[in-house]
Amino acid sequence: MVTDCPFCRIVAGDISADVLHSTEDVLAFRDLHPAAPTHVLIIPKVHLESIEQLTQHEAPLLSHLFNAANHVANAEGLRKGWRLVANVGPAGGQTVFHLHLHLLGGRQMTWPPG
Ligand code: AMP
Ligand code: ZN
């Protein structure tokens, strides 16, 4: 755990969050500032800064993250589709440096994103 990391603090229970799904490896909770009717963050419980830190070692973790995304999308009833986004680094729009996937749905998504 990284004590000044807000998502590690959510995993530790030090900061409250609206948790939708929790397994041994991953946690899914609603974004504080939703950009769509469904906006859920899916994170590994271990601290990794971003996708750039992933190695072959984390291959099983990736499948846990994607399984959690499917689980949440089903639970939220997003039958028409949804979007998964990972911002990487400052120019990628990343503001919290604990790896996370944004699951967005409940409205028509547009392309390209901003
Ligand atoms: P990113 O810009 O990709 O790093 O996304 C970080 C996201 O975390 C933003 O959408 C924030 O609204 C969200 N966020 C930051 N702090 C919290 C928190 N304590 N609980 C829920 N979402 C948060
Ligand atoms: Zn962290």
Image: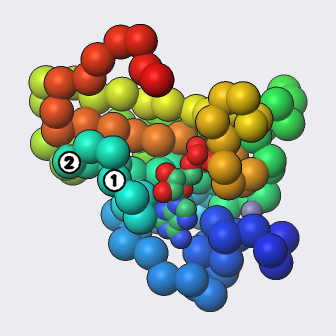
Which of the image's four quarters has the N terminus?
bottom right
| Direction from residue 97 to residue 71 in the image, left or right | left
Furthest toward the bottom, the residue is 14
- Disc 1 element: loop
| Direction from residue 26 to residue 5 in the image, left or right | right
Q: Measuring 67% from the left and 54% from the top, which residue is drawn there? A: 96
Residue 56 in the image: state x and y as whole percent. Answer: 84, 27
* Position above or below: 39 against 105: below
Which of the 4 image quarters holds residue 28?
Answer: bottom left
| Direction from residue 89 to residue 18 in the image, left or right | left
* Tag shown at residue 37: 2
Residue 98 seen in this snapshot: yes
Of the pair 61 and 30, the residue shown nearer to us? 30
Which of the 4 image quarters holds residue 62?
Answer: top right
* Position above or below: 81 against 93: above
Of the pair 70 and 99, the residue shown nearer to us? 99
Furthest toward the top, the residue is 112
* Tag shown at residue 64: none
Instruction: Say few, some or many: other residues with alpha carbon within 10 Å of mark 2 (under 14 / 14 to 19 / 20 or more).
Output: few
Residue 70 in the image: state x and y as whole percent. Answer: 35, 37
Residue 8 in the image: state x and y as whole percent. Answer: 70, 70
Callouts 2 and 1 close, C-beta under 8 Å:
yes
Q: Measuring 59% from the left and 63% from the top, which residue is drawn there? A: 24
Of the pair 91 and 64, the residue shown nearer to us? 91
Q: In the rendered image, which residue does mark 1 sit on?
A: 34
Q: How many marks?
A: 2
Residue type, label 2 = Pro
* Position above or below: 33 against 79: below
Instruction: Say few, some or many: other residues with alpha carbon within 10 Å of mark 1 (under 14 / 14 to 19 / 20 or more).
Output: few
The answer as to whether callout 1 falls within 8 Å of ligand 1 is yes
Marks 2 and 1, how far apart in space? 7 Å
Residue type, label 1 = Pro
